[in-house]
Image: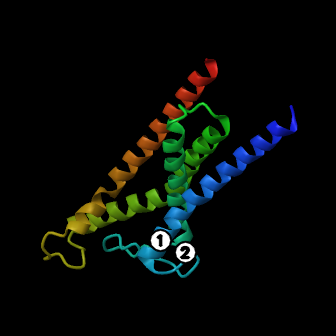
Amino acid sequence: MGLASIGSRSKFIIDQIIWMVVAGAIPIIIYRVIYGNWFLGKPVDPHLNDIKHITEPVMLVIPFIVLSIFCVFFIKEKRKLFSREIPNVILLLAGISFLVSVFPFSVSVEFGTSQANLNKTIGWSKDSNSSFDLSEEITMLLPVLMVLLYLLVIILMLYVAFKWGRAKSK
């Protein structure tokens, strides 16, 4: 193994780190545009129905950073047919990290929407005479959307593992 191959390998690793930083910066910039401050500030309330759901901004941003890394690496590596080891490891770790980082939020969303449904059923909502509210209906779909996102990430991870294994066997 010569110096040229060591240099090209370290350049490849640096390229992957740059890709991760760029992919991670996208959700941070989007968060800055939406909320107008950096995510290290005061807690954020995403307004889930009647329930006051206050969370630390970092807990909202981290899953999006990891999902962004996952999506960027998936699109980037699809052209290479998932044949490179380091990007595939980053891709799979990002997928697992996304599933782990979103789990606490998904549990709280599920609890919040089920609690809001219960309150609505027994008439405890703050405004039971209000007309149709689209945001409330969308909020009720959040648990379903989260499960679909979970399944999509898991299916894509299995696809990457399959294609990577196939590329190694050739």
Residue found 33% across the figure and 65% down from its top = 115
Residue 141, picture quadrant:
bottom left
**Which one is nearer the viewer's eye here, 2 or 155?**
2
State the image coordinates of residue 51 (x, y, percent, origin top left): 36, 73
Task: Find disc 2 in the rendering and name its residue.
Answer: 39
What residue type is disc 1 on?
A: Tyr
Q: Is residue 14 above or below residue 131?
A: above
> Does 161 sit left or right of 31 as displayed?
right
Q: Report whether residue 54 is seen.
A: no
Q: CA distance from mark 1 to mark 2?
A: 7 Å
State the image coordinates of residue 148 (x, y, percent, origin top left): 37, 46
What residue type is disc 2 on?
A: Phe
Residue 31 marker? 1
State the image coordinates of residue 88 (x, y, percent, origin top left): 61, 38
Of the image marks 1 and 2, the number of the one nearer the N terminus:
1
> Does 155 sit left or right of 124 as displayed?
right
Secondary structure under badge 1? helix
Residue found 56% across the figure and 64% down from its top = 25
Q: Does the residue at mark 1 contact the one at mark 2 (Cβ under 8 Å)?
A: yes
**Which one is nearer the viewer's eye here, 64 or 13?**
13
Residue found 33% across the figure and 60% down from its top = 114
Locate the C terminus and report the quarter of the image it occupies: top right
Residue found 27% across the figure and 68% down from its top = 119
> Does 166 sit left or right of 6 as displayed?
left
